[in-house]
Amino acid sequence: MDTSRHISARRAGILLCALAMAVAGSAGAADGGEGLAGDWLNRFASARSAAIGGARVALPDEPLAALVNPAAAAWLERGAVQVNTTRLFEDASVSGFGVALPASGRPSLAFNVLSLGSGGFERTGPLSDEVLGSFDEGNLALGLAVSQVLGNRVAAGVQVKLARQSIDEFSGSGVGFDLGVLGRLPAGVQVGVSALNLGGPTLALRMRDETYLPELRGGVAVPVSSGQGLLALDAVSRDGADLQVHAGGRFRLHALELSLGYDIDNFGAGFSYRLPSGLQLDYAMSDHDLGLVHRVGVTWRFGGFSAEAHALPAVFSPTGSEPVTRFALKAKTRAAATGWRLEILDGSGLVVRSYAGAGQPPADVTWDGKDALGRALPDGAYTYRLHVNESGGTSLQARPGTVEISSGGPRGGIEVTP
């Protein structure tokens, strides 16, 4: 492995992200294309992606990601169902629903639905302010994406998209297509490119046709802190609008992820929390000239490709009746497994013992409570985590677990009566 090439790729990615964050303020002041056809879809972001500023074209980590890069489902580790809602201003809101089914050896699928409701507007007379009733505006977008892994480091996808708009008694619908590509560089750097709204949709309303503007997106995601965090950057170009910049970062603390980002001309922040059942809760809050925008999402992950590690027993005593614990290991990989590594960390985050090997991990690994030099470790709680590497540079990481060493004897007190 060429270590210098890995380091240079990561440095280049980090430099690119930092440069974009530095110039984002000047880019955000430019015309973002407000009011152009399809602008509502261009600006949509789920709670998870909004928390990092909407920089998501290189981050295939949720079903709704296929709306900006149709190749996303090909790199998802597990199947997922996602529900998202965004509360805008007055009675306006955006609701989203997505399903992704990643596959190995055949195309992966993603289906997404977005709905924008404006709430009611007052209808007035042409020559007076007399209220004659109310009307509303609605927008709907449906996307079906098909994606496929091409080789070890590239995935591509295509999406057919149906859009519909209604204003009062007038309505129109049209169909368009999206293309997307994802790539993996050395050092875990991911890049993504997509071309959206190809050949439409074109909506025929009352007086004239409106066509969603062609849109070109490019992005990069760079892992930091040994994979515990990442920096992401997107650049978006649309006909008739200036360049849009999205940038943000994310850091993981066990099951909790904290995010901060910059989206066109506003800052955002949020978090994601994963439960053992496969549920994930997402929340994001972003600033806007009209006030704060709140987004909430729920994702359920199932099946798919994953790595698992469990300690049995979870509490053991090297000097007692249960002197060892066994880590049960399991991995279902998308590509051939090239190696695995099980790390045991103390309370300060220092790796005190590790096990590694080539190919798939074994069914179990035994630990006697000692460090790499054979010294007995003190009582306390230790965190363990499993990494499995796949051919092509991809990897799986099991959910971290906790095992405890308890060597002390029975505890109690003696009451002395004078």
Image: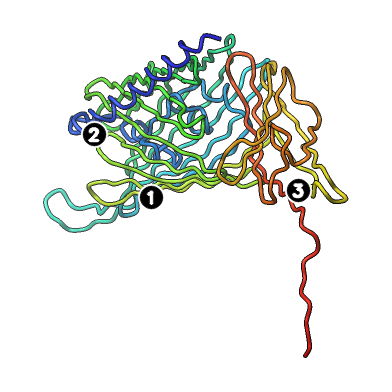
Q: Residue furthest bottom?
A: 418
3 or 2: tag closer to the N-terminus: 2
Q: Are marks 1 and 2 in contact (CB under 8 Å)?
A: no
The residue nearer to you, when weighing 355 against 17, is: 355
Camera-near label (1 vs 2) is 1
In the rendered image, which quarter is residue 244 located in?
top left
Camera-near label (3 vs 1) is 3
Camera-near label (3 vs 2) is 3
Q: Position of residue 72 (x, y in %)?
A: 52, 24
Tell me the element at label 3: loop
Q: Which residue is disc 2 drawn over?
A: 34
Q: Which residue is disc 3 drawn over?
A: 314
Callout 1: few (<14), some (14-19), or many (20+) C-alpha neighbours within 10 Å?
some
Give, as a three-letter code, the residue at label 1.
Answer: His
**CA–CA distance between discs 1 and 2?**
20 Å
Q: Residue furthest right?
A: 321
Q: Residue furthest left?
A: 127
- Give left or right: position of 397 versus 311: left
Is residue 304 at all visible to an observer of this figure? no
Is residue 380 at all visible to an observer of this figure? yes
Q: Which residue is disc 1 drawn over?
A: 294
Tell me the element at label 2: loop
Give, as a three-letter code, the residue at label 3.
Answer: Ala
The C terminus sits in image quarter: bottom right
1 or 2: tag closer to the N-terminus: 2
